[in-house]
Image: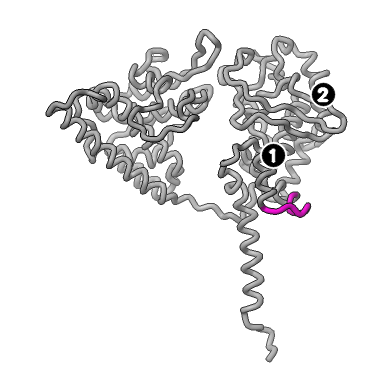
Amino acid sequence: MNNLRDNVQVRIYKDIKGASFPVVVRNGFLPCCLYLNTYLNDNHNSPLSKTRSRSSKQSLSFYTRKKYAYELKFLYCFFMENGIDLVERVARGSFLSIEEIDDYIRACKFYVDTEDDNKDSTLVSLTDKRIRDAIHATSNSQPEVSAHTFNQRLNRLKAYIEFLYVCHHYDRADTEQQISTDAQFNKFKLYISSVISNSRKDNTVVKDPFEPAISADKFFDLLEIIQVRSSDNPFKSSKLRNQIIAQILIDTGVRVGAVLKLKVSDLVDDWGNPRFRLTRTPNDPTDTRHLPAANKTKALSVSISRDLMKLIKLYIETVRQSTSNSHEHDFVFISEKGKTIGKPMSYNAIHKVIKTFGESVGIALHPHLLRHKWNELFEDKAREKGFSADKIEDLRKYAMGWVEDSKMASVYNEFQLAVTVAEISSKNQSQSVPNLKGDQ
C-alpha cells in the first residue's frame, strides 16, 4: 500500500494540438485506472441527468478537470488502500455499504490533498486507525477542510459511481439481476445525495464580516514596499516587473490568470484611456507553459492609469527587450533568470512574488486577496460618487467580467453590507437606549 500512495500522482500532458490535460497516474506515467481517466477527460454529461444547461454540454476547462483530477486521486487512493476496487464493485452491482460511505465521508472531512504544480502532494494513509486519530487531532488543533472542498469530494464520488453504472448497467434489459443492481444503485445515490444536501447547510467556517481583506495600515505599507525605489522592497532583482504585477492586481482586481495571459498585443496605449484587452483563448497554441494561463471571466477591456501604462511600456522596451528567448512569444511578463529565462512567467512565480511582498508587511498575502481588496475600494469609491446599489452591482459585474446572473457580487460585498447594517443598528440603539449621563 505504501507504493500506492507514494506513486499515485496527477500529471499534466499536452495533446498533438498543444492542449493540456490531466491524468491520474501510477509509477510516474501509467494511468492508474482507465475508467477513472476516461471519466476525468471525456465524460461529464450523464444520460441520467434530468436537467442539463447548455454550458454543461460544453467541454470542461483545463483547470476544472485539473481540480477533478485531485479529487479523483483522493477517492481512488482511499478506496484502493481499503481494499475496494470501485470498478469491480459497480460492475458486479454491489456498490458501497453505508459503513464504507461513512468512512469515506470522515476521510473527506479531515484530510487535505493539496495541489502543487511542481511536486505532487503526498496522500496520508487512510486506515481506520488513522481516521480516528485524525478526527481526534483535528478537533483539537486543526480546522476541517472547507465546506466546498468537502462537498466537491462527495460530489466527485457520486458522479464517478454514476459514470461506472452507465458504463456497465445503463439501459440494459430488465432481469432479476438488473433490477437488483438498479435498486442498489438508487440506494447509494439516495444516501450520498442526502449527505451532500445536509452538509451544504453545515458550513462551520465563521468569518468576521467586519474584517477587511487587508487592514488599512498594512495596505498602505504594501503600496509603499512594492515600489522599485522603496528601501524596504524585498527583492534584489526583477523589481520593476514585480512592482507592475502587484500594481495591476491592486489597481484592476483581475485574476492571476489574466496577468499571466497578458500579451504585448493586448495593450492599448491610448493617451485618454490606456487599457488592456482581457481575452479568452483556451488552448492557446502559443502558450507553452506546463500550466497554461487561463482567464475564467468574460473577455473585456480593463482600464489602467497612465502611470501604470508607462511602467509596462518601460519594462517591455528595456528588461523584456534585452532578455534572451523573450522574442519567441508575445506574453508580457517573463522569467528573468535561471533555466526558464525569457519564457512566460508561471503561476508559481507570481504567487511567490505576492507572498514575498506580503511577508515584508507581515501578512499572509495571495493574489486573490488583492481582488477582494479591490472590491472593497471599488465599493467605497462608487458610494462616494452616489451610485445606487443596483448600479454598483452592474458596474462591479462588468469590471470583474462576471456573467449577468453571477452571485459573486454578494460575496465581495459582504464587508460593506455588514458595515451598513451596523450603522443602522447603531442609530436605532442611540434612539432607544436610555441616557446614562444622569439627565432626568
Relative to residue 342, is residue 146 drawn left or right? left
Residue 420 in the image: state x and y as whole percent: 65, 60
The kind of residue on which mark 2 rests is Lys
SS category of the residue bearing label 1: helix
The kind of residue on which mark 1 rests is Ser
Relative to residue 358, is residue 120 drawn left or right? left
Question: Which badge, 1 or 2, comes first in the chain's sequence?
Answer: 2
SS category of the residue bearing label 2: helix
Q: Are marks 1 and 2 in contact (CB under 8 Å)?
A: no
Eyeballing the image, is 90 above or below 387? above
Please state, as top left, top right, bottom left or bottom right, where the N terminus lies in the image. Answer: top left
Residue 54 in the image: state x and y as whole percent: 48, 30
Residue closest to the far left: 176
- Does the image show residue 243? yes
- Does the image show residue 234? no
Relative to residue 224, is residue 410 drawn left or right? left
Q: Residue at x 70, y 89 (%)?
A: 439
Residue denoted by label 2: 313
Q: Is residue 116 magenta?
A: no
Quote the CA–CA distance across marks 1 and 2.
27 Å
Residue denoted by label 1: 360
* Residue 337 - label: none
